[in-house]
Image (cartoon, grey):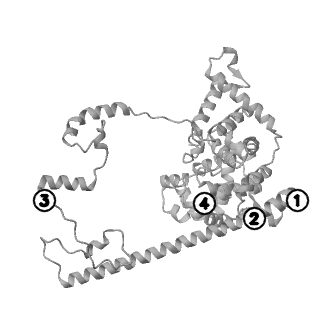
Amino acid sequence: SSCGHHNKIFFPLRNFFTKRTKELKPALHSAPGWKLFGKVPPRENFPKDSKIIQQEYEARTGRTCKPPPQSTRRKNFEFEPLSTTALILEDRPSNLPAKSTEEALRHRQEYDEMVAEAKKREIKEAHKRKRIMKERFKQEENIASAMVIWINEILPNWEGMRTTRRVRELWWQGLPPSVRGKVWSLAIGNELNITHELYEIFLSRAKERWRSFSEPHSENDIEDAGVSVADREASLELIKLDISRTFPSFYIFQKGGPYHDLLHSVLGAYTCYRPDVGYVQGMSFIAAVLILNLEEADAFIAFANLLNKPCQLAFFRVDHSMMLKYFATFEVFFEENLPKLFLHFKSYSLTPDIYLIDWIFTLYSKSLPLDLACRVWDVFCRDGEEFLFRTGLGILRLYEDVLLQMDFIHIAQFLTKLPEDITSEKLFSCIAAIQMQNSNKKWAQVSENNVVKC
């Protein structure tokens, strides 16, 4: 879960394996090639050469195996499927009656049909690959030309151009990776007036604290800025644990990876900068995405300012009344846009908190493929919190048909980790189709009018 305690279950694996090994040992001696446990003698480690196997077999049986004569009739085929398909053309072994002419002809026909089908599949695959390459090439060309516009025209005239229709449309297409960090920084802003020097101060404080945690501390140090050492220690321990779970498929964030310590620094400095918020699970994903696109200190500045926005503050400080207000507003637009799915969720008492908390806590970077999550971030930086909820409705719209067939458990599981093959084109066309207006009221107005009964 995004917030809360982790229950750890430990299995006494070592004892289990030792016990099993003792039980299995006698049986293992009878089958030298089947060593599940225990050490395999070095000479048995190497797979035997097929010739040696053949020689051993001949020595044991007294027979010699001649290689089968190469069938000449199949040499002329330009296409030969690499499977057992061709076996149907083989003659029967000598100890069985030969095929009849009809059977041989039928097998030949079946074989030709299989070859034709395989060829057709191969051509289809080739066309698909060609289409994907073409699309990728077109995408790269668009990114390259957009990059020139961003660097030469938009960024030098940021304040004047950021709200123009042309820039907004270009922004919707996704930001070129080379300017992404810069645009995010400008769009998030720095209302907190954090400087690089301030980051260094909080980072050295965090490092000092890590050192002091490894040493015994005196009674006088127990209370610090209203947060107990025990709480802070737990918070910093959680950071350590969470970093390795952030984008686990990326080596760069794992221990020993180039960004591991960087992520640790940004998160540690933040817990010192905002002891009232501390570290909350999900933050590591947000910090990691910023680190991938910005320099260390700039990533911290963007991170602290982003977490200071009303929506993020409500979620990360677990402000229940504010969170309920957001969920209630989301439900108004959910019913408006997807009435059928809304009723389906209602029938299972499946409330938005079950899937939305995870999405909002990590700004979709845990549930969506990273490149797609970055594109969601692009427009989130342009449109603010409303876009986070609009994206949620876009996802529900994209998978509406699938979700209508599912029960409570399967819906919850599906929405936690979305399919890997989700494409930005499909998702963004679904997001574009979501109407963020209810009885002529926009998101902010509906949100204001939502009185939450706690």
- Tell me which residue sits at (72%, 56%) in the image: 178
User: Label 1, label 4: how many angstroms apart (C-alpha)?
Assistant: 33 Å
If you read the primary sequence from the N terminus, does the residue marked by circle 1 or circle 3 appear first?
3
Where does label 4 land, which residue?
395
Q: Label 2 is placed on what type of residue? A: Ala
Depth check: give the residue in front, 1 or 286. Answer: 286
- The tag on residue 160 is 1
Where does label 3 land, which residue?
63
If you read the primary sequence from the N terminus, does the residue marked by circle 1 or circle 4 appear first?
1
Disc 4 or disc 2, which is closer to the eye? Answer: 2
User: Label 4, label 3: how many angstroms apart (C-alpha)?
Assistant: 67 Å
If you read the primary sequence from the N terminus, does the residue marked by circle 4 or circle 2 appear first?
2
Q: Looking at the picture, does residue 261 appear above or below residue 185?
A: above
- Tell me which residue sits at (53%, 72%) in the image: 128
Q: Label 1 is placed on what type of residue? A: Gly
Q: Is residue 205 left or right of residue 40?
A: right
Percent of width and height locating residue 167: 80, 63
**Is disc 2 placed on a helix, strand or loop?**
helix
Where does label 2 land, which residue?
146
